[in-house]
Image (tube, coloured by chain):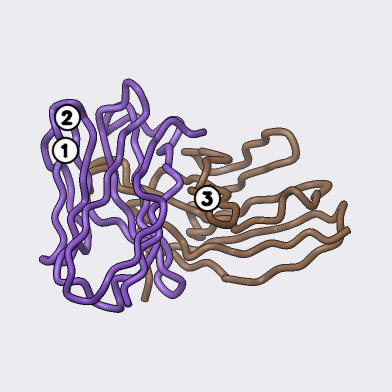
Chain colours: A brown, B purple
Amino acid sequence: QKEVEQDPGPLSVPEGAIVSLNCTYSNSAFQYFMWYRQYSRKGPELLMYTYSSGNKEDGRFTAQVDKSSKYISLFIRDSQPSDSATYLCAMRRFTGGGNKLTFGTGTQLKVEL
Amino acid sequence: DSGVTQTPKHLITATGQRVTLRCSPRSGDLSVYWYQQSLDQGLQFLIQYYNGEERAKGNILERFSAQQFPDLHSELNLSSLELGDSALYFCASSATPGDLSYGYTFGSGTRLTVV
């Protein structure tokens, strides 16, 4: 079983829809949680970073963490065609592990006009 | 441009050969990470260097090795290449090992095709 599970999609939504992307994890040592966006043939870029359980908002993006359920989500409001990309969740332990990030396999999102 | 430079962008080579991938971290970043991305495995951590020293190792094959030089650029060496080594190889950098407030900054990757 992988430490981080993420539905690969693809997920197709109409423009303006609210998108929900999710990851589950099994290692309770994970304390820092991130969401990356990766366009085709590009490197991942950081979208959101959070430490505590609860919600964190940044523009159209909201990251949600539920440590008790080992479940994280990314919500995209008013989705745009430019949001079409692969979204990767990532997480790391508080200490140790060399600060490496463990990634989900990514969810491919397509926002259609 | 993320500030992390990877060369070459594309590499096609035959099985059994050896290649070197190069990464220049973002200015001021001391830590370099190498990741392999394949369709079925996603992003897999290979190795991390901090200021010239190996800091952490992931599932890196013995055929693979890396180093970070005094000018902080890093090289990933892949030898005795197999078809299954075909993947995107990403380098990322961060300011310090513990500074993940802004996560890693990734380069654009090197696409390796082994034929």
> In the rendered structure, are the residues bearing label 1 and label 2 in contact, judged by CB atoms less than 8 Å apart?
yes
Query: Which residue is identified by label 1?
Result: B68
Could you tell me which residue is drawn at 70 percent across and 58 percent down?
A20
Letter of the chain that mark 3 sits on in the rendering: A
Q: Amino acid at mark 2?
A: Asn
Tell me residue A79's x, y (percent): 80, 50
Could you tell me which residue is drawn at 43 percent across and 37 percent down?
B105
The Cα atoms of the two marked residues, 1 and 2, are separated by 7 Å
- Quarter of the picture containing the C terminus of chain B is bottom left
Nearer-the-camera pick, B85 or A69: B85
Tag 2 and tag 3 share a subunit: no
Query: Which residue is identified by label 3?
Result: A42
Query: Which residue is identified by label 2?
Result: B51
The Cα atoms of the two marked residues, 3 and 1, are separated by 23 Å
Q: Amino acid at mark 1?
A: Gln
Q: Amino acid at mark 3?
A: Lys
Q: Considering only order in the chain, which callout, 2 or 1, is on the residue closer to the N terminus? A: 2
Tell me residue B66's x, y (percent): 16, 49
